[in-house]
Structure formats: structure tokens, C-alpha cells
Image (cartoon, rainbow, N blue to C red):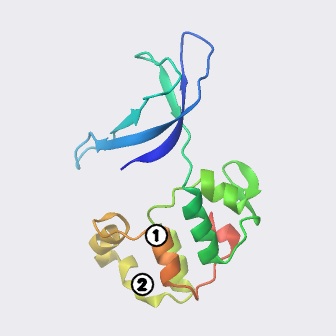
Amino acid sequence: MSEQIEARPETSHRDLKQVFRGLHLAKIVLTGPASEKHTQHHGISLGGAPLTYLPGDALGVHPSNDPALVDRILTALRFTGDERVASPRGDVSLREAISHCYALAAPSRKLLELMVQRGASELAPLLEPANTHQFKAFVSGPDARDILDVLESHPDVTIEPAEVVA
């Protein structure tokens, strides 16, 4: 795992924001499967960053998706990316929304339900209550499928821009 992230360390003892792009090097789950909490440790490379980061400082992370992946998803959906959609950032272009507001890795249950409703009937068994294990393997197992896989596997399914971000 090595993805580029933008981090903004903000210190509590001074009014200063320092912005840099760093690499997300590690994600380690710290809590056990029976825990009520889900806590992760993230390793972020500060190498070469022109900043001062002291223990106790806060670190804000503002992730973005790979522009090439965004382009491929827009192509699979047959959109330009200029379509306007509601997002956590307000009314923005679909490209802006899927670039900066949504994770594009695992397809959601909602997306799979929509795909089934629109004709991707082979996905229906994954949504049955008895197949929870298969659904989890499909979205997060060693052979997990991502959103792009699902869209490219079903080119005849039509989804509206607002449904992509719903």
C-alpha cells in the first residue's frame, strides 16, 4: 500500500497550517474483531516535507482519488464529469465529488442493489442475507472487486449521476 495523500498538520500551541503531500505507507487495525471500536494506526511518510510536526500536534488528512481511476469510472458510466451533483461539499461536478468526497475502492451494498435492479442479476445472490460471507469477500476479500470492476463488468447498466453519489 503506497498511496499519495495530502496532510495538513495543525498545531495546538500556534496558529500555523503547513500543507504537504505525503505517502500513506501503512494501515494497521489495532482493535480485535470483537471490539466495539475500530481503531487503526496509519503510517505516513514525512520524508522531504517542509514542516515541523511535534508529538501532540493534530494531523488533518484530505485524501483524493487517483485522477486516472476517476477518468476510468467516468468513462465506464459514460459521463463527462461535468454533471452537477449534491455532495458533502455542496453542489459540485461529478468529477469533483468522486475525486474528493467518496472512496472508490469497495462497491457499496447500495450500488450492488442498484446494479441488480438495472439488470446485473448475477450480483443478486451476493445481497441475500444467507450470503453475507460472500458479499464481504466480494467487497473486501483477497480477490475483492472495486467499483470500476463492477461498472466495467456491466456496461449495459445505466446509472444517473445523482445515483453515483447517493
Based on the displayed image, in which of its 4 quarters is residue 130 positioned? bottom left
Q: In the image, what residue type sits under mark 1?
A: Arg
Residue at 37% of width from left, 78% of height from top? 126
- For the residue pair 131 and 14, the one nearer the viewer reads as 14
Based on the displayed image, in which of its 4 quarters is residue 158 positioned? bottom right
Quote the CA–CA distance across marks 2 and 1: 11 Å
Q: In the image, what residue type sits under mark 2?
A: Ala
Q: Position of residue 50 (x, y in %)?
A: 53, 23
Location of mark 1 (residue): 109
Location of mark 2 (residue): 124
Does residue 35 appear left or right of residue 104 in this picture? left
Does residue 127 appear left or right of residue 5 in this picture? left
- Numbered disc 1: secondary structure: helix
Residue 34 visible at all: yes
- Which mark, residue 1? none
Q: Say few, some or many: other residues with alpha carbon within 10 Å of mark 2 (under 14 / 14 to 19 / 20 or more).
A: some
Q: Residue furthest top?
A: 13
Residue at 56% of width from left, 40% of height from top? 62
Based on the displayed image, in which of its 4 quarters is residue 65 positioned? bottom right
Q: Position of residue 48 (x, y in %)?
A: 47, 28
Locate the C terminus and report the quarter of the image it occupies.
bottom right
- Numbered disc 2: secondary structure: helix
Does residue 28 appear left or right of residue 17 in this picture? left
